[in-house]
Amino acid sequence: MEPGRRNSPVHLFSNFEVFMKAAVLVEPGHLVVKDVPMPQPGPDDVLIQVTLAGICGSDASFFHGKIVAPLPVIPGHEAVGRIVECGENVTRLKVGQRVTIQPNFSCRTCPVCLAGHENICPSKIRLGIDTDGVFAEYVKVPAAYVWPIPETLGDETAVFAEPSAVACHCLKILTPREGNRVLIFGAGVIGLLTLQLAKLHTAEVTAYDINPQHLSLAQRVGASHIIASPEETGRFHDRFDVIYETSGAESALSQTIELAAPAAKIVLLGLPARAYPLSATMIVRKELQISGSIIYTNEFPDAIDNLLSGRIQTEPLISGRVTLSELNRSLSDLSSPDRVKMLVNVSQNE
């Protein structure tokens, strides 16, 4: 028996083709739940039994064809599960461990990666887009991108590790100082997580969103002020020292420039659907600093620690729970005003 598979219950069936339930994206807008062959881990991989998955906005974009990749594929990249099989070269992890997944696999050899920017590796592989993801009973993942989670951290909290790592990364790029006036532009999942981390550094954190349900959640997790419409922004012009733009809305950058105080710093996390014109005049006149922030590098341990300590609240962000068979409807309805984070009980396939 191969050393890495010594205690694997899956290995007992290795002489037979084993199948699992998975939600397969066969064409844009159409998922099919069906039996597919269980993935076989290579020497540097682990096989994870998925217990809970999260639905992300990028999953919905992929579902609707706004992100293009070869099909069919199993989508999904936010998950918690247990290792059921380890490849022969895997020594850091073991069968039975509860884990979460860092779902962007960089090459780790190119100049970009070697400079510490694995998040923007030009060859990175995206779990659930370029390779089969977590909307399935099992998923194969390179062991280097798997993080153990404590047994004391519940599944419905631990499943937020990936989006929390996104928030941790943008706070690493720009950390507010005490006394800074912070604006969170967009109170979706990433905005609400970023808000909570910003509150650890300064008292005044304002949330701006046109969705009243999202603003209610922002207040629940610590927003000191809210802005509910473009008409309200006039009294906040030139106010904010630090701005995190998480919405990707077409008008977002021009509005953040108006709301920014002189010499303010702006971090852009939201990805616009298309390019839009921008006047640089106010950026120059105000001497603004604008940075981009995309996914994460080494922030998963910090994200897990923030979840474990309670510094990040996740329960208020959960809008509902679905099964694999309900994914088509959930992905179609993700933009509904009352939806923030939907979870997928993968083991319930009915």
Image: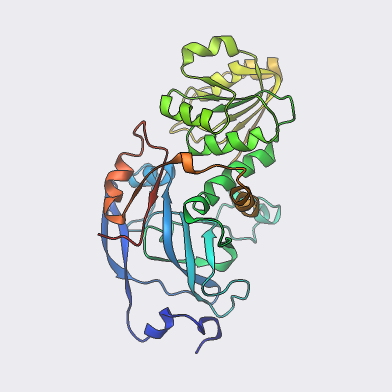
Any part of residue 279 in sight: yes
| Residue furthest front in the image | 152
Residue 335: give x, y in percent of width and height: 36, 35
Identify the residue at horizontal 37%, vertical 65% (top origin). 137
Quarter of the image containing the C terminus?
A: bottom left
| Image quadrant in which you'd find residue 76 | bottom left
Judge whether residue 129 can be spotted in this image.
no
Q: Count of labels shown?
A: 0
Q: Is residue 133 above or below residue 59?
A: below
Query: In terms of depth relative to the viewer, which is nearer, 329 or 255?
Result: 329
Q: Give me the residue at 70% from left, 35% from top.
A: 175
Tell me the residue at 59%/16% (across/down): 258
Name which quarter of the figure residue 15 lies in.
Answer: bottom left
* 4 relative to 236, above or below: below
In the figure, 261 relative to 129: above or below?
above
Residue 206, x across and y down, in percent: 58, 24
Q: Residue at x 48, y 22 (%)?
A: 251
Give residue 43's position: percent from left, percent from top: 54, 77
Colouring scheme applied when the structure was drawn: rainbow
Q: Residue furthest right?
A: 178
- Where residue 345 appears, as percent x and y from the top left, is 36, 56
Would you say 30 lies left or right of 258 here? left
